[in-house]
Image (cartoon, rainbow, N blue to C red):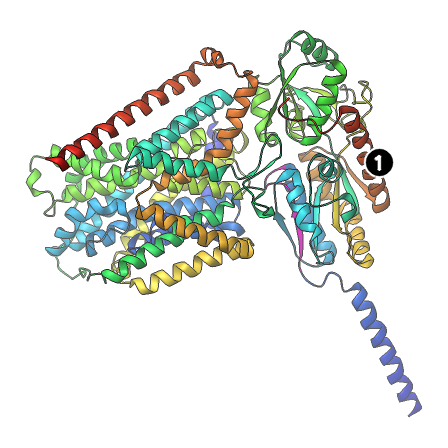
Amino acid sequence: MPELSAITSAFGDALTLHSIGIIFGGVLLGYLVGVIPGLNRSVAIAIAIPLTFYMSAYAAIAFLIGLSKGTAAGSAVSAILLNTPGEPSSAATCLDGYPMAKSGQPRKALKIGLLASVIGDLLSTLLLIVVVIPFASIALKFGPYELAAILIFALVFIAGMAGGSFLKGMAAGGMGVILGTVGLDPETGAMRFTFGYAELMEGVPILPLVIGTLALSEMFVQLDEYRRTKGGNSVRLGNNPDDDLSFSEFKKTLPTIFKSTGVGAFVGALPGLGPSVGSFMSYGLAKRGAKDPDSFGKGNPNGIAAAEAADNAVIPASYIPLFGLGIPGSVSAALLVGAFMIHGIQVGPLMLRDHPQMLFTLFAGMVIASLVMLAIGWYGLRLFAKVTDVPQHIVIPVVIFLCLAGIQVQGYGTFGLLVVFGFAIFGYFLKKFDYSFVTFLVAFIVTPMLEMNLRQSVILSGGDIGILLQRPIALFFVIATGLMVLHLMWSSYRLYRQRRRLLSS
Amino acid sequence: MKNTRLHTALLAAALTVGVGTAQADDFPSKPLTLVVGFGAGGSTDIQARVLANVLEEELGQPVNVVNQPGAGGGVALTRLTNSQDEGYTFAFGTSMTITYGPLATETAYQPDDFRYVAGVTLGQSAIVTGEGRPFGDSWESLIEYARENPGTSYATQTALDRMIIEYISQQEELDLRIVPTSGGAGMAPLILSGDVDFAYSGGTHSGYAESGEMPVLLSLAEDRLVAFPEAPTLREAGYDINPAEIRVVMVPQNTPDSHVERLAVALEAATQDERFIEITEERILMPVVYLPEEEVTETLRSQTESYKALLEELGGVPDADE
């Protein structure tokens, strides 16, 4: 266990003016991104990574985490005022937020959303800190067998849970794995899938891949939609004296907030589910558990609180597998792995041993980010209400410019531009045909680690599968993976039969 | 009048000379790029960043560090061969990439493609093991143990250490399981957890010198290691190989002499700079030296020759599938 002095000095480092400034910048930017419909979290992180090249590793990661948290809170604003979620995960917030705003209480709705966001985020961050340290100290003892088994398990789990069909999820994961093997073979040094490009020797460059598949392709999708819908008008913040949140009203939502934070943290800790699942699940639970379920959907404050607390709780909780095992369970966590790699740090349990100071400072920074979020949201209420009106025809070109500029900053040159556009088209079709994005990205990121550990396991054991009997943890995950594949296949088969029956009847 | 003309003439002459020297001494007149062939955060990178800071002051121009990892430093060198930058782009790397890389794989560069401005550090790579192993921490008993236990495992990181271990296992008639791993960060957990019996280490072991968690079996440097004086060198253990690693600064062959000289002067000053000495000798625990261009070039050439001879004896580059 870390010493108390390490923790206090970590807080000291995180409380410097420079550090708070960086976090403030990250949260503010994230909040804006969250508020602007059409700009989402992964787009923002992807184009912000190049911005962080010139920061220290700590500042860069703190900035990106702040940004990621800010988006989850900011997205409530457009959900409430515009009935358009700023992030897909705030769709559940629209259900009660927009009716409440329409009925003349936009400020109250916004404040409930903000407080639920901040509490969900803060509690989940504290949970992360408490859980991850013992978790990582166990994970440190894992060898190649355990890591290979856990990585395969995580990939299959994400493919099955990330929504859509299991086969499509596996296909998306498979594409990620194939792209992840591009470059030099770690053992023989042979070139794989490089097609004579020296640039591909070190693998598909992560930044063009991420910016292409996440950010640029998203802009293509948005353009597509923009041709059809031109966006609505947002509810204005009036000067209605009734329109404010009283403490007793806030107190009534607290039980919902706590319950929803629990749901969100649980969903977040499991790889692949993501914030949308968390917020809808907790909204459903709140509605079912309420005394007056009929009032949900008509402006019930508990509906807003449930959706927002869970949405925000997912983000810090999704870093548990990231810091504990080095496995990213969400798109934003996968992007963080990329950012860590660029700054030369291998994220995962080794951080606890090699960079403990940095890890604790990051945690301290995350707590500070929650509080900064409250301040920004509270005092920026009016400003952010205005930002919801920023039209798409301004947002889209700016983002496209930032995407391409980001590639140039990193010095990939024309090769980078080719890769970006190639992946933008690829990502566009992934989205159109509903292939799981998270699975693809996580598979791409973990493939080098998976390949290395798998090869080490095979060589060390001399190819003898009986080694698993001496490795109970690895054995457990291998069996769990097998059972999960059977279960997922069986349930997709049942779904397929049901559909056929529906069609034929 | 005459006087004025003389003055003008003198002034003109002075200006010409001034411009002339300015052109020669102009280098560097814009920011420079220091290419590192390894990822950020590794020991080469840590050292390169301090070196860049020191050179910045010596040269009076910003020196930007760019990481181009891949192929054990080979990717960066491939790009450097095509550079027409006249010394504004230079690389900091390890001798192995130059001497063994082109022998082991088909590289787009050859040792003659570069000028080796100076060697600034001597590597301390080693063959290491973990604590509490049945063979203890001596090379001889490891060999004995490995003979009795076929399937004793070794973790390799580079093509060169793979060749050396193949050579040793041929000499000693061992049957080893050789697993790949990447960098010290990949090797350390394997050794510390006991999953692997012994391993190559570029410099990670130096960080464990005090705790004793990673004893050194053999020194892969020319002499015994500074931090582990008990461990014999390869030669002392009876293998005629000198894989001593030198960390060198290199530029493309087409770089003008004056630019190379200017860089060499700055590098010699850098090897006497306290910050560079501190990061090298205290943090990554390698001795700082200054080896001028001729000496480094000669050493690298003789290493290449000895590897060639070794490969002939082995009958080709060891294949991973064996």
View extreme (top): residue:
B148
Task: Look at 47% across and 35% down and name the residue there.
Answer: A359
Q: Residue furthest front?
A: A504
| In-image side of A194 versus A382 (left or right) | right
| Left or right, residue B177 beside residue A440 | right
Q: In the image, which residues are magenta?
A: B31-42
Quadrant in the rendering for residue A309: top left
In the picture, measured across the screen, residue B278 lies left or right of residue A373, that is right
Please state the horizontal and vertical placement of residue B56, each as a whole percent of the image: 69, 54
Q: Position of residue A333 (x, y in %)?
A: 40, 39
In front: A64, or B167? B167
Identity of the amino acid at label 1?
Answer: Ser
Query: Is B55 part of what is drawn in magenta?
Result: no
Q: Residue at x 34, y 64 (%)?
A: A394
Q: Secondary structure at mark 1?
A: helix
Percent position of residue A167, x then y: 32, 34
- Viewed as shown, does residue A242 lie left or right of A276? left
Report which quarter residue B107 is drawn in. Answer: top right
The C terminus of chain A, quarter of image: top left
Position of residue A264 relative to residue A462, above or below, is below
Q: Quick check: A458 above or below A470?
A: below
Instruction: Determine which residue is flagged by label 1.
Output: B302
